[in-house]
Amino acid sequence: MGILDIFKSQLIDVIEWKDSSANTMVYRYDRGGKEIMMGAQLTVRESQVAVMVNEGQIADVFTPGRYELSTQNMPIMTALQSWKFGFNSPFKAEVYFINTKQFLDLKWGTANPVMMRDAEFGMVRLRAHGIYSFRVADPVVFLKEVFGTSAYMTVDGVEGQVKRTLVSGLSDAIAQSKIPALDLAANYDELSQYALKMLAPRIENLGLKLESFVIENISLPQEVEEAMDRRTSMGVVGDLNKYTQFQAAESMREAANNQGGTAGMGAGMGAGMMMAQTMQMAGHMSQQSAAPAVSGETKFCPECGQKIPRTAKFCPECGKKQ
């Protein structure tokens, strides 16, 4: 092998990254000790961005496509480098591939209760959980603020920071939505969209974009859930008088069915009589509650001395106005 062949074996002429994982965010191209030659082919696939770094300084950024590394495609790198050996010489630089796809189905949850001020129950503690997704929106900002000089980075490297940022802002989103605590369960979609608009700007300074934020469940305090159960029960019962009659009839029927033989027949007849009496009493109570009360008190007419109803306006005997 000649000297020229040895020199060529130390040059890289094809640069690409085939991502086989589901959660890799940044990959630094492994040069293996070799140098990139001018005129090398750079392939950037969909959902990827390639960033060239020269001596720690971000130079050119390449969007999806195929490029031949030249002075035309690398204007910043050309300005930074002093080409001592002409434009066909090799150069030392790092190439970072940033994954710009959405990272889906990431879990979030409130480790501690979130405080909410409710108009009906006052201060309420809530717990919630759900999923969210995000992507790298600004590769340059992400490299500067998050990635640094590492060789490899996955979602796990930023998930904790993003999750805590979102959960901390959730209490503000719930409070500003002004949705009552009793209506939260019926407004998950509306609250999720409102929270997405409020929380998205909180991670933009990291070069990230919050694509979705979904609330799967909000757990209310026990006392609030009990109040909801009571209201639901009253709505199901409806007319309390009819419900009382129905309950009495059901109780009598079960008592009669639990007896056997002749004794059961007698018990059944007795139960039927008791049921009728109970229903009559319930109906009478219903009529009394519906009809206005009539006073039975009397008084004496000061003119003729006759006993007349206390509510009478005229005496029925002498016609004197009372």
Image: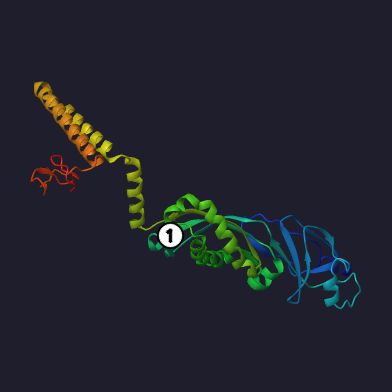
Q: How many marks?
A: 1
In this rendering, position of residue 213 left or right of residue 271: right
Q: Residue at x 14, y 27 (%)?
A: 273
Q: Residue at x 87, y 67 (%)?
A: 70
> Which quarter of the picture shows residue 222?
bottom left
Q: Please name the residue that numbered disc 1 is placed on.
A: 127
Q: Secondary structure at mark 1?
A: strand
> Which quarter of the picture shows residue 278?
top left
**84 or 188: nearer the eye?**
188
- Answer above or below: position of 308 versus 269: below
- Answer above or below: position of 234 versus 103: above
Measuring from the top left, give residue 16's x and y in whole percent: 76, 59
Q: Residue at x 57, y 56 (%)?
A: 193
Around disc 1, counting alpha carbons within 10 Å, would you say few (fewer than 14), some (14 to 19), or many (20 or more)? some
**295 or 278: nearer the eye?**
295
- Answer above or below: position of 316 versus 182: above
**104 or 260: nearer the eye?**
260
> Which quarter of the picture shows residue 196?
bottom right
Q: Residue at x 36, y 56 (%)?
A: 224
Measuring from the top left, give residue 285's x and y in whole percent: 20, 38
Measuring from the top left, give residue 14's x and y in whole percent: 80, 60
| Residue 258 appears in the rendering | no
For badge 1, the amino acid type reads Arg
Q: Which color mode does the image show?
A: rainbow
In this rendering, position of residue 3 left or right of residue 278: right
Measuring from the top left, give residue 43's x and y in whole percent: 79, 58
Location of the N terminus by quadrant is bottom right
| Residue 158 appears in the rendering | yes
